[in-house]
Amino acid sequence: MSSGLSERLEAIQREVARELERAADLSEIEAIRVRTLGRKGLLTTEAKSIGKLAAEDRPAAGDLINQFKSELESTIAERERALGESVLARRLQAEAEDVTLPGRRRGLGTRHPLTIVTEDLLAIFRRMGFDVARGPEVETTWYNFEALNIPEGHPAREEMDTIYVSDELVLRTHTSPIQIRTMEEQPPPVRVVCPGRVFRSDTPDASHSPYFHQIEGLWVEEGIAMSHLKWALTEYAREFFGSDVELRFRPSYFPFTEPSAELDLGCLFCAGEGCRVCKQTGWLELLGCGMVHPAVLEGVGYDSERYTGFAWGIGIERHAMLKYGVPDIRMFFENDLRFLQQFVGR
Amino acid sequence: MNVSFRWLSQFFDDGVLDELEPAGLAQRLADQGFLVDELRPAFDPFSGVVLGKVLDAKAHPDADRLTLCTVDAGDGSRQVVCGAPNVEVGALYGYAQVGARLPGGNKIRRAKIRGVESDGMLCSAPELGLDALGSAEGIWAIPDADEAHLGRDLREALELDDTILAIDVTSNRGDALSHLGIAREIQWITGKKMQLPRVDLTEGGRAASEQASVQVEDQEGCSRYLGRVINDVSIGPSPGWLQTRLLALDQRPINNIVDVTNYVMLEVGQPLHAFDLERISNGQIVVRRAREAERMETLDGQERVLTSETTMIADAREAVAIGGVMGGSDSEVSSSTTEIFLEGAHFDPSRVGRTARRLGLVSEASTRFSRGVDPEITGWAIDRAAEMIAQLAGGRVAPGVVGVGANAERRAADDGALTLRDQRVEALVGYAIGVSEITRALESLGFDAEDDTDGALTVTVPSWRFDVSREVDLIEEVARLTGYSRIPLEPLPAPPVAPEPTGDERRATRVRETLRAAGFDEAQTPSFVDAATLASVELLDNLVEIKNPISQSERFLRPYVFATLGGAVAYNLNRQASCVKLFELGHAFERGTEPQGVPLRERRQLAMVAAGTRGPLDWTATDQAEYDFFDLKGDVEELLTQFGLRECIVDRGARRFLHPGRQAEVTDDAGNAIGFCGELHPAVTASWGLASRVFVAELGLDALPTDSGTLTVSGVPKEPAIARDLALVVPDGETARVVVDAVRSMGLEDLDRVEVFDRYRGVQVDPGYYSLGVRLTFRTDRTLTDNEVDEQVDRLMGHLVEERGYQRR
C-alpha cells in the first residue's frame, strides 16, 4: 500500500468537516460535494491514482477510498438535511401571522325572526300530520267572511277592522280562507296549516300592526272531537314553549267555530304570579280555536253530521315576541340590522 | 262590560256571592267564557270620613275666606274651619275626622287655623277621589243624604266599598251586557237562583194614552216601541248612592231622569230614552225611516246627516231622536222639564249598528241594540225606570203604557224547540256528560230541557239567547259550563302518509339559505306604499288602491316588493349601517287587465336590495370595496344557479327607476322575463334622501323551479387541459356576451370553456375600442399538443379579424 493515502484521505475528511461547518446555505454544501466527490473532485483524483499502485495494493486502496467516499457522502447529506431544516424553520418563523387578526368574511345573513318562528311551528304541525297550504292576500269577501259563517251585518265582521280594496275584495283578515279553498278542492279528511300575512285596520303601536302573520290550522275527519283539539294544541304549546308550560282552555266565541275556545299560556315572565306583561292575571292569551262550525262544513258541501273537525289560528308575531322577548311588534317591520343580526344562527 | 260585585250580589240572597269573593268569581267566570280582564276597587281607598251635617256657619274672626262650622256627626257637635266658599247650613257633607286618611294618603290632624282649632275637615268631591261628582273649588254637599245616618262611615253610606270586574263579553253575547246577564251566568256557579228586583208601580193622574201616542211606520227597524208618561217631576241631581254607582261603572251622572235610564240599562241591558214630553209636538211619536240626507241635531250639539237606513223617532213636526243611537237636543230633558215621556224600544240590530258606526256614535245604547236586546225585558224595564223616577224625582206615573208590539212575536228560531242528543255532545266534546248534568247546566241559564224517551232532550231557548239556534250551540253551552278543563286529551290519528314540505316551501328555503350565505338578511316590510315613493320610481300604472287606508298617504298596495324593501335599506343607512344587504319574499299587486278576468293580479316576489360596502370591514383590503353592479349580478347569478338557471341575466333593460346603463333583465331558461337587477337611478336615491348607490333585484318567485330535477353525472376528464389567454381589442358597444358568443360560434373542435378574465380601457388601446381578456381552455379525450392548440387559436383569430374586425393586443 502506498504510504500517505490514508493520511491524505483523513486530511480531506478534516477539511470537508471544517468547510461544512462554515457553510451557510445549500449551494455552499453543493460546492463542497463537487470539490470532493465530483468528477474532478479530490476523492475521484485519488481513485484515479490507484492505477499507479502495485497490483497487490490496489484492492486495499480501493476499499479505503470507497470507505472514505461513503463516509463523506453521508456527512455532507447529514449537514445538508440539518441546514435545510433550519432554513425552513427560519422561513416559517418569518411567515408567522398574528392569528388574532380578524378573518376575511363575507358576512352571514339571517332568516327573519318571523320566518324562524313560522318554520319552527310548521315543523311541529307537520310532524302531527298537517300539510301546508298558502293562498292570496287579497281575498273576496265571500272567502273571508260568508264562507266562514260571518254574513254581512254580523258584529264580528264589523269588529274585524277590515281593509277593503273594493266592495268585493279585502285584504284577508285571517288565513282561514285558505282552509275553505282547501276543503273545496278535496273531500275529507283534511289536515292543513295555512301560514301567511293578514291585515287589520289597526293603528300601529307596540302591540298592533296593520299587517301581521298567522298560521291557521284545520283538521276535519270522522270522529274528531274537542279532546283531539286539546291534545294537538297542548303538544304544540309544549314543543314550542317548553314542556313545563301551564295551559288553560277557556270558552270564547268565533263565528266559524262552535264550541270555541281561547288557549291561555301561564305567564312566561312571572310564572303565573301576575306581572305587567300578563296584566296581573298570570295568563297570556295565546290563540283562538274551536270545533269547526257545522255551517262552515255545510258551506263546502261536507256532511256535518258525519264529519267534524277543529281549527285554530295563531299569531306569529305574538309567538316571536314571547319566545324572544321582543317588546314592540313594530321592530319586526323596521328591519333594523342591529335587531335582525341577533337572529344569526337561529 | 264593567260590573259591580256589590250590584251582582243584590241579584242573589244575602251572602251567596260573598263566599266566592271577587277573585273567585272572576276565575269561575273566565272558566265559563267570560274573561275578567281586570279586577279593581270601585273607588280609591280612604278612611275616617263620616256623614256630617253643618249646624251653623259663621265667619272666622281673623280670615275673610274661612268659615267656622259647627258639624254634627251623630255624636255631638265639633268645630271645623272650612276654606270653601259654599258652606250651606243644614247640608250633609263628607266630614273627615281627626285621624282620617284621604285618597293619596293624606292624614287629617287636629290643627289651629289662624288661631282657631279645627276638629277635622269638610271634604270636596275630588278630595274623596270622586272628581266627577263635584268641583275642587267647594265642598261637596251629598245629595239626598239621609239625616238618620249622621256619623255613618261615608264609604258605607255611599256604597263605595265595591269591586269592579271588567268583563270581556264576546260579541255573540249581547244578553250579557248587563248585571242581569252576568247574574244569570252566575247561577251555575252558585247553584242558586237569581232574582230581579220587584217593581211596585203606583200609577195616577191622566192616562198615558191621553197624553201621548205612538205610531210605528218602520216596523222592520223597530219591532217594539213602548212608552210611559211620568208627570210633575222635578229635575235635580240623583242621590249620592246612585251617582257613585254610575260613576264606578264609568257613567257620568247627569240628572235624576237620565241617571235612572242609564241605571236600568246597566241593570238589565235595555237602553231607555227619556224625552221632555212638552217638547214632543202633540205628544205624538212617529217611528219612521229617515229621509235621505235628513238632518238633525243630536244632544251632543252636532248636526247629523242621515240616510234611509236609519230609524228615526219623530213627533208631529220633526225628528226628535235617532232610534237606538242618540236623542235630539231639542227634546232633551232639561232642568225645567216637568213631564217625561219614557221610551223603551227594540230596534233592528244591524241597522242600529251600521248607523252608529257611520255616524261615529257608538254608544252604550247602540252597542247593546246592535248586539241584541231581550225583546221581553222592555216592559219590565220601563216600569222599573218609571218607578225609580217617581221615587227620585217626585213624579207621578200616568196609568198605562202606550206603544206598539207589547206582545212582540218571538223570533222564529225560538218557536221550535231544539233537539239535543247526548251522544252528539259526547261525539263533539270527546267524553260522556250525563243527561242530568246537561239538563242542570242548560236550566241554570234559563233554558228549558225536557228529557225525551229516545235519548234526546227537547230544549226551549229563552228569549234573550238569540245566539242559540242549533244543536251545536247547546253543546257549546254544556261544554263551557261543565268546563273545558274536564275534556281529556286524545291523540290525533296518524295520517296514512307523513307530510313533506311542499315544493313552495322547499323553494323558499333554498332561496333563504342561498341569500343568507351571501350575506343578505331577510326583511319583512309593509304591504302598503305611499304615492310619493311610487312617483319617485315612476310606478304609477295599474296600482291597487285601498278604500280605507290606515294613513292617507300609504294607500296603495306595493306593485313590487323592492318599493317597500328600499325603505328598510334607507332606514339602516340613515342609522350609520355601512353594509346593508336585505331580501324579502312577499306579495306584490297590480290591477288586472283582462276584461273578464280577475280584477287584481297578485304575484309572489323575491326582492334583494343592497347598498354600502361589499361586506364587513376588511383590514386586509387597502380600500373598503363598495357593493357594485357586478356584486349584485353575481349574487343573483349564484341564486339562479341554485335553481339550475344559467346565463339568464340578459341585455340591458329599460326600466326608468334604474340607472339606464346599469340594469339587466332576468329570464327563465326559456327566455321569458322573470325580473330584473340593476342600480337604482340616482334621481330615485336622491329623492329617498340617500347619498349611497343602491342596487336592487326582483324576481317572480313562481318562475323558479320547485325541484331541481334528476342528475346523471358525466365522467371527470382524465386528460390535461391547455389554456390560452387572448386580449382582444374590440369596438366599444360590442358587449362581452357578443364577443364570447363569437368565439364559441366558431365551433373549435377542442375548445372546452371560454371565460372573461379582464377588461381594459386606456392609453394602450385606440379610442373607440377596448380590450377584453378571454381565457380559452382546450381539452379533449387525448393529450393535446401545443401545436394543435395554436393552430386552433390562429384559425379563431383569423376569423375574428376578418369577420368581426377584432384585433389581438
Image: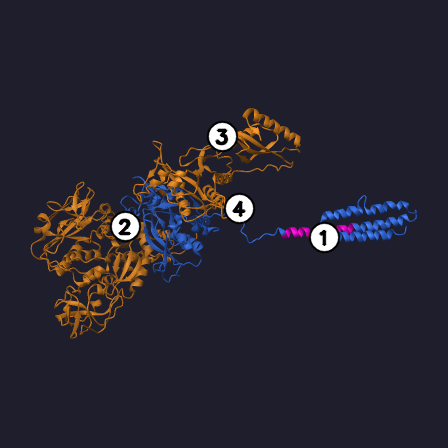
Could you tell me which secondary element the residue under label 1 belongs to? helix
Q: Nearer the viewer, residue A292 or B79?
A: B79
Residue B152 position by quadrant: bottom left
Determine the chain carrying the residue at label 2: B
Both marks 2 and 3 on one chain: yes
Which amino acid, mark 4?
A: Ala
SS assignment at label 2: loop
- Write down the colour of chain A: blue
Name the amino acid, label 3.
Gly
Residue B120 to residue B435: above or below: below
Q: Tell me which numbered mark, 3 or 4, is placed earlier along the sequence.
A: 4
Marks 4,1: beta carbons within 8 A: no
- The quarter in which the N terminus of chain B is drawn is bottom left
**How are the colours assigned in the image?**
by chain
In the rendered image, residues at marks 3 and 1 fall on the same chain? no
Q: Which mark is residue B621?
A: 4
Marks 3 and 1, how far apart at CA: 62 Å
- Whole-number angstrom distance, CA of label 2 to CA of label 1: 99 Å
Q: Which residue is mark 2?
A: B467
Which chain does the numbered disc 4 sit on? B
Which residue matches tag 1? A82
Tell me: B762 left or right of B596: right
Horizontal relation, residue A211 to residue B794: left or right: left
Q: Please, which chain is the residue tagged with disc 1 on?
A: A
- Say which of B217 and A15 sits in front: A15
Question: What's the residue type where badge 1 is placed?
Answer: Ala
